[in-house]
Structures are given as C-alpha cells and as structure tokens.
Amino acid sequence: MTIDPHVQALAEELDQLIEGAITNAPRSLQTRIGPSELGIPCDLRIGYKLAGHPPTNTEQAVKWKAWVGTNVHAGIEELLTRANYSLPGWATDGQVRYALEERVTVGQVNGIDVNGNCDLYLDRVVWDWKIPGGNRLREYRKNGPGDQYRAQAHLYGLGWELKGYPVEHVAIYFLPRDQEWKQRYLWSEPYDRSVAEAALSRADGISKLVAALGPDAFSMLKRRESWCGSCAYRLPGSKNLAEGCPGDPDAIAKAAAGLQDLIA
C-alpha cells in the first residue's frame, strides 16, 4: 500500500503532537523519586534515580504504554468524579465517597519528603490501578504483584494513615490493556505499615551511600532484573556504571546460556 505524501505529512504532524505530549507529561518529567519506585528490586536503579543520573536508554524516548495507562487512570478518575457529584449530599456538604488522586506524603528518604498521588481511597481501602499487557497480567494473576507494586500499595497506605485516615487493606486492580474486561484481576491484602517502612529504610540507606560516595557507590549497589528494557539507565555493553547499566549480570548470563543452548 502506498500512502499519499500529503497524508504522510499529516501523520508526521500528528506524531509530533502525540510524542510531544507523552515526552512532556508530568510523569515523564518527574525527577524526584516517588512511591511507585521505592519498591523496585534493583538497588542500582534506585541509586541512579536518587543521584539524579541522566537517562541513558534512548530506546524508551516515547513511553507509549505508560501514556495509555495514564489515560485509563484519567478516564476512571472522571467517571468516579461524576459519581461523587451524583451523591445526595454533594450539593449541601460536598462530601465525597471516592477520594481521588489525593497527594500523600509517605515518609522521608535522606530527609526529603517522598510523596505521590494515590489513585483512590474508598472505605478504609487504598486502591491503585495498573494497566498491564497480557503476559504481565497472567504473571500477576499467577504470582501476585511483585515487590515493587506491593511496596507501593503499602506506601500509599502509610500516606493515608499519616493523613489521619483509617487503612485496613490495600488493593491493586490490574485492568487489561489489550484483553477484555473480564480478564481483570484484583489483588489485595491487609495493610502492613512495616512493608512501607522497610521500603523507605532501604531507599534511605541507598540515598545516604550515594550522597557520601557519588558515582563510586554505583558499583556497590546490587543489580537485579527489573524491567531492564524499559529502565531509563540501561546502556547495553556499558563497562562503567557511572555512565550507565548494562543490565542485571545474572539475567545477562542466563540469556547467554539460553542462546548457547540454541547454537548447540
């Protein structure tokens, strides 16, 4: 199929607008670490973030999947906002049932507040939406949310507790990005403040180490596979961690062994 040059030029114009919106979205421009990142299993990735290390992964310049997720969040926020407006007492007292996108402070890392917007607080339960693809969704259904998302859920629980609200459970609602609605998966467990405090303590130690040693600290931080392909600090083949990370050595060795098996 041949595309008319005029249509192609218009497509490029639209591409620039879309890509510009994604690149300049608040989440893309955020430089301070947030609750969603404190549970990342890779110490080095957190160290880069806390050190303000510049991104090195040029392959992830346009975060399309994240933008799709952001817009699903926005759609849910809009419909629940309308649900708040329809409550019988809204016109007189302004009381809401669905507390949406509230800014909460979950604690401090090296003396600096860590805060973020929580998707929903509803009836003593703290909620977070995730919009994964099919493979990830099946993984979460089988093995649970993983360290990062679990820590994030409890950190937001701590944030609401510190605001003076009772928190009994945390919940992550995995909503399918490329499957049908019936494939959604709900994970939940009782709120545990110690999970949040452990994530904060770990990040605090990493931050203090990086502050004391600078880039020399990077070689002391454990690398662990954590969506390396989408990591902002990935630099394939790097021999110098001060420049960028080549990836988790165990994952690289595993991949090399698998390739060797195929060759054999």
Image (cartoon, rainbow, N blue to C red):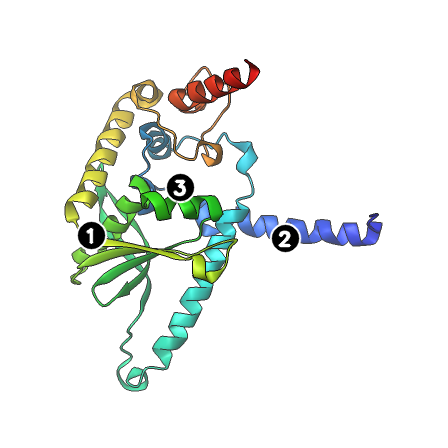
Which of 69/240 is in front? 69
**Element class at badge 1:** helix
Relative to 165, 241 lies left or right? right
Q: Earlier in the sequence, mark 1 or mark 2?
A: 2
Mark 3–mark 1 CB contact (< 8 Å): no
Q: Where's residue 104, x and y in %?
A: 26, 55
Q: Amino acid at mark 3?
A: Thr
In the image, is residue 59 above or below residue 113?
Answer: above
Q: Amino acid at mark 2?
A: Leu
User: What is the number of the mark on residue 158?
Assistant: 1
Q: How much space separates mark 3 and mark 2, taking CA atoms?
A: 23 Å
**Element class at badge 2:** helix
Q: Earlier in the sequence, mark 3 or mark 2?
A: 2
**Residue at figure coordinates x 34%, y 22% from the top left:** 218
Q: Which residue is mark 2?
A: 17
Which of 162/121 is in front? 121
Label 1 Cα crowd, 10 Å radius (few <14 / some 14-19 / many 20+): many
Q: How much space separates mark 3 and mark 1, taking CA atoms?
A: 22 Å
**Residue at figure coordinates x 16%, y 48% from the top left:** 193
Whether residue 233 is visible, yes or no, is: yes
Q: Quadrant of residue 233?
A: top left
In the image, is residue 83 above or below residue 45?
Answer: below
Q: Which residue is mark 3?
A: 31
- Number of the front mark, 1 or 2: 1
- Number of the front mark, 3 or 1: 1
Which of 138/228 is in front? 138
